[in-house]
Image (cartoon, grey):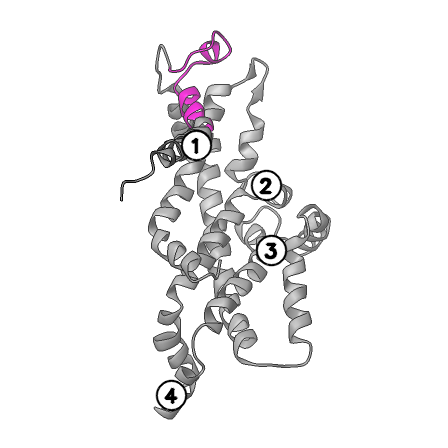
Amino acid sequence: MAANPKYKPAGNLSWLVCTLYIVFLLLPIYWLVNMSFKENSEITGAFALWPHSPTLRNYTVIFTDPSWYNGYINSIIYVALNTLISVSAALPAAYAFSRYRFLGDKHLFFWLLTNRMAPPAVFALPFFQLYSAFGLIDTHIAVALAHCLFNVPLAVWILEGFMSGVPKEIDETAYIDGYSFPRFFVKIFMPLIASGIGVAGFFCFMFSWVELLLARTLTTTAAKPISAIMTRTVSAAGMDWGVLAAAGVLTIVPGALVIYFVRNYIAKGFALGRV
């Protein structure tokens, strides 16, 4: 039976819509890259789809100025610390929620999620006063611990879903075989939820990488992140748009690398319905 030709335009239209959607999403990224290779005079001048006089001066400023490249180093340090702490703390907590039932467990689980719902501005002043008393202001660990307030509940929520999908009989079989709990958890259980750990680590990394308020409030100079440094591009000569655009391009790179390395885990997490 011949195919009905009236369905062909609908197929072509769907491809057109998808193409326009992708172009719409990539346009800001392209324009950011485009600006990063321009001088300020060309950026503020006539409209152009590509640089007429490409320059690497903006990237040279970032890689040669300590105030710029140290911002990237600081951000990577506290984001890596936060990801490690958040996932390490969330693993036993998520296991407890998935395997045991205790008084108030559902209320406690919901309370953890309310911390993720609260805006960072609510906790900026308490964190500042607390860390000032302990001398932690302007340190990487201060920002890493502050971000745990939001990332640990998120990691617990993600990991609990993955752990609940693992049959409890595996735990019982391991105990019968003589496995201690730490050995069972590391050797058997964690490989079974490797995709969940990858997904939780990815979201912890991304949320900590893009957070600005707490990172800016709890640091001054030594641990200032790149997101806070990017707000200081105004000088007597005006806004340095080219350097700001180059810095923006470089902030996308770490996130893109993380997505590349955990892409299979993220895809599996969505396929299992746990994300």
* Disc with the residue nearer the chain's start (1 vs 3): 1
* Disc with the residue nearer the chain's start (4 vs 3): 3
Question: How far from the left and from the top, in percent, is residue 175?
Answer: 40, 89
| Residue neighbourhood size for the residue with mark 2, other residues' Cα within 10 Å, grouped as few (<14), some (14–19), many (≥20) | some
- Please give the residue where the numbered disc 3 appears in the rendered image: 150
Say which element carries label 4: helix
Stretch of the chain drawn in magenta: 28-50
Give me the disc on residue 17.
1
* Disc with the residue nearer the chain's start (1 vs 4): 1
Instruction: Specify whether residue 33 is painted magenta.
Output: yes
Residue at x 57%, y 57% (from the top left corner): 148
Under mark 4, the amino acid is Thr
Q: Nearer the viewer, mark 1 or mark 2?
A: 1
- Cα–Cα gap, marks 1 and 2: 34 Å
- Cα–Cα gap, marks 2 and 3: 13 Å
- Cα–Cα gap, marks 1 and 4: 52 Å
| Quarter-of-image position of residue 60 | top left
- Cα–Cα gap, marks 4 and 2: 46 Å
Q: Quadrant of the N terminus?
A: top left
Say which element carries label 3: helix
- Please give the residue where the numbered disc 4 appears in the rendered image: 173
Q: Nearer the viewer, mark 2 or mark 3?
A: 3
Instruction: Specify whether residue 140 is painted magenta.
Output: no
- Please give the residue where the numbered disc 2 appears in the rendered image: 212
* Disc with the residue nearer the chain's start (4 vs 2): 4
| Quarter-of-image position of residue 69 | top left
Would residue 148 be visible to someone looking at this image?
A: yes
